[in-house]
Amino acid sequence: MVVRTARTMILCPAIISLLFAQVTGAGTAPGNSRELFRETAVWTVHLTFGPDQWNAMEPKDSGRGPFGVPGGPRVQGGPVRFGPGMFVAPAFLKDGDQNHDGKLSRDEFRSLAEKWFHEWDKDKSGRLNTDKLRDGLNSAIVPPGMGPGGGGPGPMLQAAPGHRNGVAGAMGIDFKYVHADLEFEGTSLKNVGVRYKGNGTFLQSRSSLKRSLKLELNRYEKDQSFAGVSKINLHNNVTDASWMNEVMSHRLFRDAGVPAPRTAYARVYVTVPGKFDRQYFGLYSIVEDVDKNFGQENFKTRKGAIYKPVTPNLFAYLGDDWSKYTQTYDAKSKLTENQKKRVIDFSLLVTGADDAQFAARLGEFLDLDEFARFVAVEVYLSTLDSILMMGQNFYVYLDPKTDKFQFLPWDLDHSFGQFPMGGSQEQREQLSIRHPWRGDNRFLERVFKVDAFRDLYLRKLDQYSKTIFQPERFHHQVDEIAAAIRPAVQEESDAKLKRFDTVVSGNPVEPAGFGGPPGGGAPPGPAGANVVIIGPDGGRPDGPRFIGPPGFMQPVKPIKGFVDARSKSVADQLTGADAGKTLDGIGFGSPGGPGRLGPGGGPGRFGPGNFLAPAFMAALDADKDGPISHDEFVSGFAKWFDAWDTDQAGALDEEHLRDGINRQFSTNPPTQPGRFPPE
């Protein structure tokens, strides 16, 4: 591998140009998957859509609301714009609409305030602090039992049965395949299937052209493939100013012996007659699909089972009926009865066996060596939008030869400690290697107690700390990839190039695509001490901005800075010089410490309440003394009713509620966050 340092990149432009010429497609299409997936290759992709197909690809209203609840918020042409109203408005109606007419009268709205205050005031102190608000909102917005185990992030991220999981899917956003023609580095393929893809990245890029895409080459033309693959994933990297998190993280897993997708890059152009004429959409990463071709490449068989779980309670026993597991495990291959039964049997062991039985039989179901490798890399990367916290973004593979489960990584744009909901920067850099998960995670808790696994895992960490976790390796990879992709980044915009050059040099930048003041700081007004501004809107500077917990959108260290700190922390923890930092509770790295969300904050169940409790506190605590009294709560609701009843109808339907909540907790005029409109 050719290695270039940052200094060489600056002083030797001729060498950089030569390197770039070597790693781009240069007009020669790849003949096989090995040629296709070269991490510094920058291919040229051109998609042509008919106008009707381009329009049809835009997601339409599914009729489902947040978390798959029928009758949730929707507007003509698609699901509602992202904001707190989409989560909270259905809860207002569910708990307050006494006559079931689909709206809240003034009396019903007041009764709702009384009901929530008394239900949330668990200790009957007559006051609601942030903890009570958070737990009450989570109970109201995410009903118990929605998804396995109830509560936790997993149920929030599961869609209605038969639909795509993830936050966008849970909001009712479905993606439809349409017909298009593909030209890949001069090779033409007709009539391929194309749809949008992604969850958080889709929401963040929805108001822009550069959305992630999934290409299914044989969807409409039987047996059509290219370079040995039938599916191509084009990821837009909107959360990653370096375009490298996924590419380098997948490589790290492969370096550790974990089967992981291969990657490359592509300049993507789109033509739609009358709309776009070979329009440059930007630089995308190409990520290998985890499908039967992947199974053949990595396991030498196409018969293995591929699951993509979304749950905070992995391998929880739900009974012997597979239909109760279907949405949670979201199989990506056709399952045999044995492959279904294997999940159920392992779930029964995880849930019901005592410690001795579990330790004795764990190796019958789980490939301990592969899982130790997988977890060692996952923990090093502090990628918390994963099995470690959110219960998503990984595959489980059942090897037909061994009948054991293996784990495969996926969706690593927030790797290298860049998941903003996963504690503070310091916590992510010093994440405990012995207790790396956040909240309750029975599966990991039980596995980490098994001596056979724990010893393997710590040995892998020790081995990798001396080899593939060395910071210099990552620095060299950053510089090499930067040399290859910089021209394509520059072609997108000068602003993106500036951000790119900054993170490549090792310096942090502000999060992209989220509104808010520099550094994600607090807005003005009484909410300032306890909230920050968030709100994905595709990077529009004038888009709505919503408030959330402190620390959520602080700048994060890019790869070079993170690996320097993380490698030292892992090494120190292995020698016993440092214990690392755990992420107990469900906070977001606020100044109060792990699991705290402002004055008196503490651990609690994950959910929208974690975002909204500080906002409710700021809005309803009229005398700013901390807790909210009964009178403050009820009178605050009365002011909300008057402000949200914009047409003076004397009742609030779901649209009134949603729009009022979004305005109330937005930094845009006419109000400041947490302040009532002028009386």
Image (cartoon, rainbow, N blue to C red):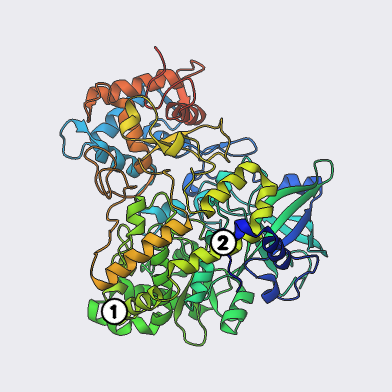
Residue 289 position in % (x across, y down): 61, 68
Which residue is labeled 2 in the image?
479
* Circle 2: residue type: Asp
What crowding class fits label 1: few (fewer than 14 Cα within 10 Å), some (14-19), or many (20 or more)? Answer: some
Q: Nearer the viewer, residue 443 or 544?
A: 544
- Residue found at x 25% / y 24%: 624
- Picture disc at residue 601: none
Q: Nearer the viewer, residue 496 or 125?
A: 496
Q: Nearer the viewer, residue 552 or 88?
A: 552
- Residue found at x 56% / y 46%: 499
Does residue 177 appear in the picture of this structure? no
What crowding class fits label 2: few (fewer than 14 Cα within 10 Å), some (14-19), or many (20 or more)? Answer: some
Residue 97 position in % (x across, y down): 40, 31
Front label number (2 vs 1): 2
Furthest residue to the top?
679
| Res 234 → quadrant | bottom right
Which residue is labeled 1 in the image?
358
Q: Is residue 628 above or below residue 351?
A: above
- Residue found at x 58% / y 73%: 334
